[in-house]
Amino acid sequence: MIELTFPLSDAAVRDLKVGDPVSLYGTMVTGRDAAHKWLIDTFIKKTRTPQGDDAQAIEALTPLLKGGAIYHCGPVVAGLDTKQYRFVAAGPTTSIREEPYQADVLQHFGIKAVIGKGGMAARTLAACQSVPAVYLHAIGGAATLIAQTVTRVVGVHKLDFGVPEALWVIEVKAFPAVVTMDSHGHSLHAEVEAQSRAALDRLLKA
C-alpha cells in the first residue's frame, strides 16, 4: 500500500499509476450533487449570488480543498442532535453523477484526489492530467468498514442541503482505495469499458 497524506504535492500525484493501492491519511471533504452544483454556480461560474453562510463556508473549505481530496459520499451520521458527530456509514457514491462539474471543481480549487466508485469520464480524466489529480476507487458495499477509518468529524458546511449532501470535513486514517484514473491519461474504467464492448461485438457477430 502506498501511504498518502493530504495535502498532496504535484510530484506525489505524478508518481501514482493506475492499479496502485493507496492508504489515505489526513483531512478530506465529502461532496455530492448539491455540493458540486453549489461550488460551480456560486464560486466558479458565479451564476448565483453568495447568500447565508456561503462566504464563511468557502473561506473554510478552500484551503482544505487545495492539495486535498473530495469524497463522493453521502454518510450516515450519528450525533446530529448534540453536534458530537460520528460517521456510522461512509460508503462511496457513484461518481459519474458529478462528471458535468468535476473538471471545473478540480481545476478551480486545485484538488488532487477525487474518491468515489465507478470511475468518471473523459473530461475529468483530462483535468486529472492538467491539475494534476487522480481518481481513487473506494470499496462499494463497505460503508461501515470505511466509516471506521474516519477518526474525527472536524465539522460540516451547508448542512441545510441535508446530511448526505452536506460538505463534511473529516480526518481519516488508513482509508483504503485504488488508483483507477491517473494523471498520465490512463483510466482503468475506460479500458474495462472498451474490453467489454469488444467482447460484446464478438458475441453479436458469432
Image (cartoon, helix red, strand yellow):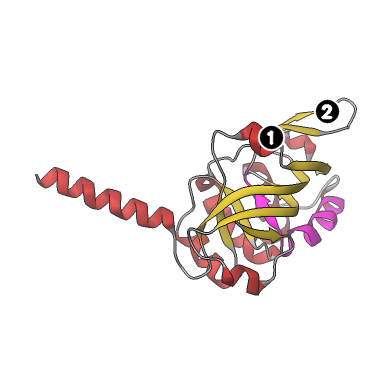
**Residue 35 visible here:** yes
Q: Residues within 10 Å of mark 2 (few under 14, many from 20)?
A: few
Q: Main secondary structure of the magenta part?
A: helix
In percent of width and height, residue 156 lies at 81, 42
| Quadrant for the C terminus in the image | top left
Residue 69 lies in the magenta-colored region: yes
Given the image, on which type of amino acid does mark 1 rest? Pro
The answer to whether 120 is drawn above or below residue 154 in the figure is: below
The answer to whether 141 is drawn above or below residue 38 in the figure is: above
Residue at point 74% right, 47% down?
172
Residue behind mark 2: 80
Residue behind mark 1: 75
Q: Quadrant of residue 104?
A: bottom right
In percent of width and height, residue 78 lies at 79, 27
Q: Is residue 134 left or right of residue 79?
A: left
Q: Residues within 10 Å of mark 1 (few under 14, many from 20)?
A: many
Residue at point 88% right, 32% down?
84
| Quadrant for the N terminus in the image | bottom right
Magenta-tinted stretch: 55-72
Q: Secondary structure at mark 1?
A: loop
**Residue 157 visible here:** no
Residue 56 lies in the magenta-colored region: yes
Residue at point 48% right, 46% down?
118
Q: Secondary structure at mark 2?
A: loop
In percent of width and height, residue 111 lies at 67, 62
Q: Is residue 117 left or right of residue 83?
A: left
In percent of width and height, residue 192 lies at 36, 52
Given the image, on which type of amino acid does mark 2 rest? Leu
